[in-house]
Amino acid sequence: MTLKTILAEVANDPNKTEDLTPRQIVERLDEHIIGQTKAKRAVAVALRNRSRRRKLDESLREEIYPKNIIMIGPTGVGKTEIARRLSKLCGAPFLKVEATKYTEVGYVGRDVESMIRDLAMGALNLVKAEFRERVRDKATEKAEEIILDAILPPIFHKKESELNPEEKERFESYKESREKFRDKVRKGILNEQEIEIDIPKPSAQTGMPMLQVFGAGNMEEMDNQIQNLLGDLMPKKSGKRKVKVSDAQKILLESEAEKLIDSDKIQQEAVRRVEEMGIIFLDEIDKIAGREGRQGADVSREGVQRDLLPIVEGSTVNTKLGPIKTDHILFIAAGAFHMTKPSDLIPELQGRFPIRVELETLTEGDFIKILTTPKSSLTKQYEALLATEGVKIEYTQDGIAEIAKLAFQMNEKNENIGARRLNTIMEKLLEDTSFEAPDLPEDKKHVVINEEYVSNKLKGIIEDKDLSRFIL
């Protein structure tokens, strides 16, 4: 299969969720996230609208823009996880950033355009990995031949048809030996044997530290361009090195795959993915919302909001991959809005986020589901981790219920940190077992976590209000 064919296939089927209905998308999210149906429905519709848009005539397609979303809810209720799982589900370029890391143009720090550059580099790595996977078989064959040449160098440097009868006989014997070595390489028998191979390596001067002086504020792109220019002027060198066969397989697979893929076409595909499928999760947006009547730091916050406007509405940002249009990138913003409210954002930015979803505070019943339902729930994670030490963890229903009850109570008494409270409780609950696991005798390697076990481990801490504030 040629690279041209591969690129055509990618262009025709750019989204893994092309055939998933909003209901099916919600069902997929339900496998990992408990509750928050409204938020799931909102992102599912936003994702489905992308596939709907691609089926329209080009003239109308350009007029349809994504409906950006603001998720409102306390920490630990699933805002970030919904966006992260959504990006994995559709294989789209995804970037999670905090709004507070950016500064207004003119101040030292990162400008908001850098989020598009970061998204572009993430897309490039994503596409490059996909293309490498497609040429893996061919690259593996080429790498294998180079390794065999190093183990058993060719005895003739001419075509088989040019050999005389005596040479042909020797060549047949050589081919038999080569096939035997090929079998040994594939079975890993020669993994520890050292061979000498040519390894491409970047020039030592590429990306000189002295250039980093430009990498502040609006000079970030200039820094990137200068480093790229120097990289082009100083091409890659190659040098001979002795490495183990197992290491040579990895190194050569990488270098041969690079030769088989077209960097320009990969960049084009990465740009297309960012423009058509990119998702940016803008967390902590409430922290840049200024409260009415406040001065000082709020002025800078408003500046960041104004800088966000053209990016969210649609503009062109220069990146390493070339200019990228942000018109059809989906922005999902999130914030707790404890001290502020969405209406404290400047009106222009509010208008760029037409869909608002309020996430619900987690209940005790939700905590029970979080501990048991997801494929990679906390309980299963600890169970798998300790199983590597030969320790078997068994949870009873009353034990799970007690953990959920204590987590809910701690959120009620102290700051409500949502499902993250379960992490602190589980860590404290299994602290001794995790520490002693390698040294436990066989008769103590079966730990049953029931209501009594949970109470004994945590009761004293829960009752001591001052202590619980610091430990749980």
Image (spheres, rainbow, N blue to C red):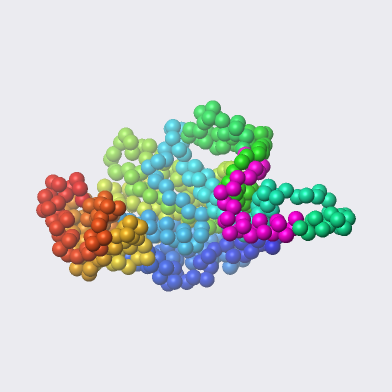
Q: Taking 420 as reference, is 86 left or right? A: right
Tell which of 4 and 2 is nearer to you. 2
Tell which of 182 and 11 is nearer to you. 182
Q: Taking 264 as reference, is 348 left or right? A: left
Tell which of 131 and 93 is nearer to you. 131
Figure label count: 0
Residue 226 vs 136, above or below: the answer is: above
Q: For residue 162, say whether it is visible.
A: yes
Q: Taking 152 as reference, is 66 left or right? A: left
> What is the quadrant of residue 189 in the picture?
bottom right
Residue located at (62% from left, 57% from top)? 184
Q: For residue 236, say whether it is visible.
A: no
Residue located at (59% from left, 65% from top)? 13
Can you give x and y, in whole percent of width and height, for residue 81 in the image?
A: 38, 57
Residue located at (11% from left, 50% from top)? 464
Q: What range is drawn magenta here? A: 174-201
Residue located at (45% from left, 38% from top)? 110
Can you give x and y, in whole percent of width and height, for residue 360 in the image?
A: 28, 62
Figure quadrant of the N terminus = bottom right
Q: Is residue 122 magenta?
A: no
Tell which of 75 and 316 is nearer to you. 75
Q: Taking 353 as reference, is 190 left or right? A: right
